[in-house]
Each structure stands twice: as structure tokens, then as C-alpha cells.
């Protein structure tokens, strides 16, 4: 595992974008695994700028997003799908047919999860997976206690996660209680993983994930078992790593 501690969020965003850009240049037909949440917003901004300056193209790239609330309409103002369109998809040259998303409106959840896994399989898996980390150590929406062997599945969100995400919805009552997420097993199959952590609220989770035992109680701790993980943390998030 490679750990890069950077001074602040701006530098984290720049570094993360540079890694994504380098991988896209190496492999224009790259399969990217993408995350939502506040953490990658700065990285997406950097990617859009790099695209506008002609430093990177996503024309041949494929994307898979980690997760989506359930139920939620794709055009709901707080759906992860809408978030991605605003932050990245609508501002770069990604081909619509190569953008993959879990459908928060799917009637048959099991079928939806199998469809996603089949699509991942069909493209040969993810080359570079970007991850944030929840305050409770979750990755994607794999909450503490999620078995490591699970593939894409439906989850009940914890109270803590719903509270953390209420900032986007305005009120806790409006946060969907469930989500669909790529499982730990699906995430661990990625060839390369980039984990981003910013701010002191993530310090405990990051320390538990990187320094603690590998346990389903801290989903991100599974990354200790992956052969190619880069963690970029700002000083605030890295304060308990010493
Ligand atoms: C969200 C997402 C995760 C994200 C995490 C942290 O709920 N499902 O993919 O990494 O929680 O979010 P943030 O970056 O806003 O702190």
C-alpha cells in the first residue's frame, strides 16, 4: 500500500487527478470505477480542467459507479447519477453508452445487481477504482459488518451514514434508507485502487482501515489485502496515522 500525505484538500484533488490522468493516457480504453460524495469533487474539477486543456480524453473510457441510493429516480436532484453528470459526465467526452450505473428505480433488485456484475465482467473488470471512505470506514455503501465476499447487492444504510448524507438532502427524513452498492468482492477485483480521505472526520476511520486489523467491522481495512492501493490523505485525515 502506498500512502501519500498531502497538505490540504486542494493538493489531494490535484494528486488524485494526476494519477487518473496518467492511467487514462497509458490506457485510453481504461475502465474507471468512480465514487461520489464530497471528497472526489475537487478531483473531478481537476479532470474537467485537464480535459478542457487537452491533457486527457475519456472518449474510449468506460465508467462504473460504485453505488446509488435505493429507491431514487436517476434525475432526482440528489441521486448519485445526477451528481456524476454535474461533476463530470456532462463536461467531458465520455460516451453515454459506456457510462454504467446502478438503477435506483429497478423493480427487481437481484436482477439489477446481477446485470451490473455481468456488465463489469463483460468489460474485463475495473482498471482503476477511486474510493472515498465513510466516517464509519465504509467503502461504496458497504457498511460495517458487510461480508467481504459479497458482490453488488442492496444494503440498509446505517443511521450514521444517513446522518452524514443528510447534508445533501436537507433533512434526515429525505435520505433514502437503502442503497445498491458494488460489494467488497467486486471492489477488490479492481486492478488498481485509489483511496481518498480528507478532513479530521475521517481520521479515525482511516487509522482503523490502514493500521488496524483486517475486519468486516471496518470495511476499508480489506484494502490491506489488495496488491495495488494508493491512499491519498490530507494532513487532517492522516493525523492518527503516525
Ligand atoms: C458516501 C458514499 C461513498 C463515499 C462516502 C464518503 O455515502 N456512498 O462512496 O466515499 O460516503 O463521502 P464523503 O466523501 O462525502 O465524505
Image (cartoon, grey):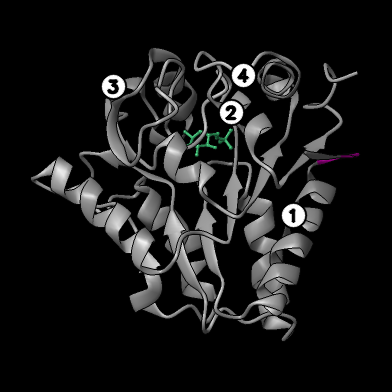
Kindly report the distance in space between the C-alpha atoms of the residues bearing marks 3 and 1: 34 Å
Comes first in the chain, label 4 or label 1: 1
Secondary element under disc 2, as helix, strand or loop, is: helix
**The stretch drawn in magenta includes residue 116:** no
Q: Residue at x 63, y 42 (%)?
A: 39
The disc label shown at residue 88, or none? none
Secondary element under disc 3, as helix, strand or loop, is: helix
Judging by the rendered image, the residue that carries numbered circle 3 is 173
- Residue 147 occupies which quadrant of the picture? top left
Residue behind label 1 places its C-beta within 8 angstroms of ligand 1: no
Comes first in the chain, label 3 or label 2: 3
**The stretch drawn in magenta includes residue 6:** yes
Residue behind label 2 places its C-beta within 8 angstroms of ligand 1: no
Comes first in the chain, label 1 or label 2: 1
Kindly report the distance in space between the C-alpha atoms of the residues bearing marks 1 and 2: 21 Å
Judging by the rendered image, the residue that carries numbered circle 4 is 214
Judging by the rendered image, the residue that carries numbered circle 2 is 222
Kindly report the distance in space between the C-alpha atoms of the residues bearing marks 3 and 2: 32 Å
Is the residue under label 2 in contact with that under label 3 (CB below 8 Å)? no
Amino acid at each position: 500500500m502506498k500512502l501519500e500525505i498531502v497538505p490540504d484538500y486542494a493538493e489531494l484533488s490535484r494528486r488524485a487527478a494526476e494519477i487518473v490522468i496518467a492511467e487514462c493516457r497509458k490506457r485510453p480504453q481504461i475502465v474507471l470505477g468512480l465514487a461520489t460524495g464530497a471528497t472526489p469533487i475537487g478531483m473531478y474539477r481537476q479532470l474537467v480542467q485537464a480535459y478542457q486543456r487537452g491533457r486527457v480524453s475519456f472518449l474510449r473510457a468506460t465508467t462504473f459507479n460504485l453505488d446509488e441510493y435505493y429507491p431514487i429516480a436517476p434525475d432526482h436532484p440528489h441521486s448519485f447519477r445526477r451528481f456524476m453528470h454535474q461533476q463530470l459526465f456532462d463536461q467531458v467526452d465520455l460516451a453515454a453508452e459506456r457510462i454504467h450505473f446502478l438503477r435506483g428505480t429497478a423493480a427487481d433488485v437481484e436482477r439489477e445487481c446481477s446485470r451490473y456484475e455481468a456488465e463489469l465482467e463483460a468489460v474485463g473488470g475495473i482498471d482503476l477504482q477511486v474510493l472515498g471512505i465513510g466516517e464509519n470506514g465504509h467503502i461504496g455503501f458497504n457498511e460495517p459488518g458487510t461480508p467481504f465476499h459479497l458482490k453488488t447487492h442492496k444494503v440498509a444504510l446505517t443511521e450514521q451514514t444517513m446522518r452524514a448524507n443528510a447534508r445533501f438532502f436537507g433533512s434526515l427524513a429525505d435520505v433514502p434508507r437503502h442503497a445498491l452498492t458494488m460489494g467488497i468482492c467486486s471492489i477488490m477485483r479492481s486492478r488498481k485502487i485509489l483511496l481518498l480521505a480528507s478532513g479530521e472526520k475521517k481520521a479515525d476511520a482511516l487509522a482503523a482501515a490502514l493500521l488496524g486489523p483486517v475486519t468486516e467491522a471496518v470495511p476499508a481495512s480489506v484494502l490491506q489485502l489488495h496488491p495495488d492501493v494508493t491512499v491519498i490523505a490530507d494532513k487532517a485525515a492522516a493525523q492518527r496515522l503516525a
